[in-house]
Image: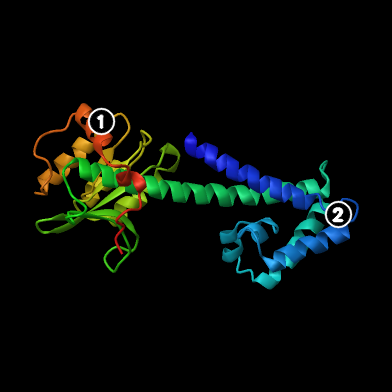
């Protein structure tokens, strides 16, 4: 809920800025359109603003193959189309709604990626530290970039007697369970995936078994102990004694705050 509050405040700031632009030249639509197009061409200030003013998120504009020179034209087309459609909303009110929709997509997507990535790295670091592995001694590394072996970035690698196994954390709810399937495909045999929860009808468990990936559900379970047992079975030098939930809680309290940064010690 804390992170939703942060996102909401960013959204409100964006809406205030967009509403202020929508209110300029209240009795002169031609001057207003000219000023908005000047803002779009200039592209200064808030980086995504020029995209919002054409009613699109940045990725959408890029995927459409639009050039910067096209943006004012797209804005004019949007306004003209709104004027031609029967609606109970005034033209500028409708434009503002489209701007707000584009801003919402951008900000929510950005916040989800930024916060999710930091939390996933922090969870991976904390869990691996609690079970007895040392990042300083290079028993594991975080934030492994894509390479020829694995095309996507990986949250962590743990070093075993015969090589390395990959660890992924997926803070994904039941509404996006397909993301878990995507992560399974890039972990590799004997790796582990810590996730939140899956819908009952999900076929991800079968996919993980086929790929020889260990699935560890975090909600209502004992994920740290499951991870310890899995790595112990791979002859990784983790703590030999089992960890109770109380042990995990105590060890978390003893960890330095830097462990939860999600950023310290990222691998190149």
Image height check: is 141 above or below 100? Answer: below
Q: Residue at x 81, y 58 (%)?
A: 80
56 and 116: which is toward the camera: 116
148 and 25: which is toward the camera: 25
Q: Residue 152: percent from the left, percent from the top?
A: 35, 60
Q: Which mark is residue 249?
A: 1
- Asked if residue 191 lies left or right of residue 22, the reply is left
- Asked if residue 233 lies left or right of residue 85, the reply is left
Q: Quadrant of residue 70?
A: bottom right
201 and 260: which is toward the camera: 260
220 and 64: which is toward the camera: 220
- Asked if residue 232 lies left or right of residue 156, the reply is left
Image height check: is 249 above or below 105? Answer: above
Q: Which mark is residue 98?
A: none
SS of the residue at dot 2? Answer: loop
Q: Which residue has dot 2 on it?
A: 25
Q: Residue 139: percent from the left, percent from the top?
A: 17, 54
- Asked if residue 69 lies left or right of residue 181, the reply is right
């Amino acid at each position: 809920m804390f992170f939703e509050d942060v996102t909401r405040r960013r959204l409100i700031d964006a809406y205030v800025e967009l509403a202020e632009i929508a209110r300029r030249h209240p009795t002169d639509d031609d001057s207003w359109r000219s000023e908005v197009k000047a803002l779009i061409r200039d592209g200064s200030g808030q980086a995504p603003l020029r995209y919002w003013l054409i009613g699109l998120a940045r990725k959408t504009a890029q995927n459409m193959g639009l050039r910067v020179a096209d943006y004012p034209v797209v804005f004019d087309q949007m306004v003209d189309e709104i004027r031609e459609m029967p609606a109970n909303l005034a033209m500028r009110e409708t434009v503002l709604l489209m701007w707000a929709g584009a801003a919402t997509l951008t900000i929510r997507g950005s916040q989800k990626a930024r916060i999710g990535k930091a939390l996933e790295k922090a969870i991976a670091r904390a869990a691996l530290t609690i079970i007895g592995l040392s990042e300083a001694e290079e028993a594991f590394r975080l934030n492994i970039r894509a390479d020829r072996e694995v095309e996507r970035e990986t949250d962590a690698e743990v070093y075993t007697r015969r090589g390395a196994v990959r660890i992924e954390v997926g803070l994904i709810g039941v509404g996006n369970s397909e993301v878990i399937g995507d992560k399974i495909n890039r972990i590799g045999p004997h790796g582990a995936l810590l996730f939140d929860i899956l819908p009952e009808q999900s076929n991800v468990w079968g996919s993980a078994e086929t790929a020889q990936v260990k699935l560890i559900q975090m909600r209502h379970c004992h994920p740290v102990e499951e991870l310890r047992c899995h790595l112990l079975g791979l002859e990784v030098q983790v703590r030999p004694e089992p960890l109770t939930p109380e042990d995990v809680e105590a060890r978390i309290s003893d960890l330095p705050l830097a462990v939860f940064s999600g950023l310290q010690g990222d691998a190149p």
